[in-house]
Image (spheres, rainbow, N blue to C red):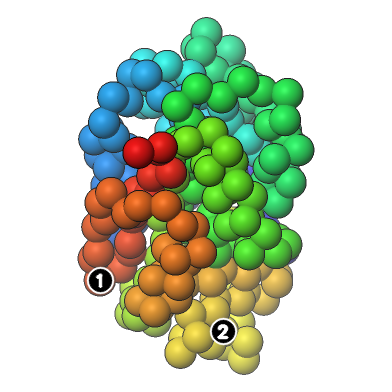
Amino acid sequence: MREYTPTKYKNLVEKTHDPILGQYMQAELDFISKIENLGEKTLIDLGAGYGRVIPFLAPKAKKIIAIEINPDMVAALREVGQSFSNTVVIEGDITHLKELLKKTTLQNPVLLLLQNTLGTIEGEWEKVIEEIRAVAETNAGGIVLSLFRQESLQSWGAKMYAGIKEMVGELDPNKTDYSQGEFISKTGYKSKWRSRQEIENIKTALGGQLIREIWTDHYWIGQISHTAG
């Protein structure tokens, strides 16, 4: 399905020569940096991978909770987390987010779902939306969601995936459907890119108040708040 390892991710994604992908990853960090009262927040990084954003975020936030399911990534994530006293690592499936966090005290949480992670969920992505909303509502918290746009899957996405095919596999032209925003590789890796209407529907499903958002030709990043009042 996918061959995600910390080394491959660092070499193929983090050190990308794709200017759009690089701009996108930086835009996410810049967006999070502008969260009001960030130093008082607990940031919950959903699908944290090997911990790419932790060195950037941990010094800025009150606490980091990093959740990851891939065993290889979790091992590296724990190593990164050990460098920051305010970082906790949880191994688990974010489709069961409420269960994973039930013993955790959350203070001013902001749930982060970055790098189109919602589009690569191996399970019910609708369940992830339900779980995120429930945690945000219960704890008067917020959500930052980042998605790839369907409109650029063919013009940019196919080239981007070709550059990281060592991780995701070679594009399957018989199964990939650009009109539906569905990338499928010959190894079975799937990634869903959302249309504008699909993004609007997700925003509605998350509830709360839209605080700010960024639309580009290639991606959307939004912040939603469930803070009381």
Toward the viewer: 91 or 107?
A: 107
Instruction: Specify the quadrant that holds the N terminus.
Output: bottom right
Toward the viewer: 107 or 181?
A: 107
- Cα separation, mark 1 vs mark 2, equals 20 Å
> Residue 58, image x and y in percent?
42, 20
Identify the image quadrant of residue 62: top left
Disc 2 crowd, CA 10 A, few/some/many (<14, 14-19, 20+): many
Instruction: Specify the quadrant that holds the C terminus.
Output: top left
Residue 81 disc label: none
Q: Are marks 1 and 2 in contact (CB under 8 Å)?
A: no
Report the residue marked by disc 2. Answer: 176
> Residue 19, image x and y in percent?
26, 56
Residue 165, above or below 67: below
Q: Residue at the location (68% across, 31% down)?
A: 101
Residue 115, above or below 59: below
Identify the image quadrant of residue 184: bottom right
Report the residue marked by disc 1. Answer: 217
Question: Of the residues tagged 1 and 2, which is closer to the observer?
Answer: 1
Q: Residue at the location (72% across, 30% down)?
A: 102
Res. 52 in view: no
> Residue 117, image x and y in percent?
53, 55
Q: Earlier in the sequence, mark 1 or mark 2?
A: 2
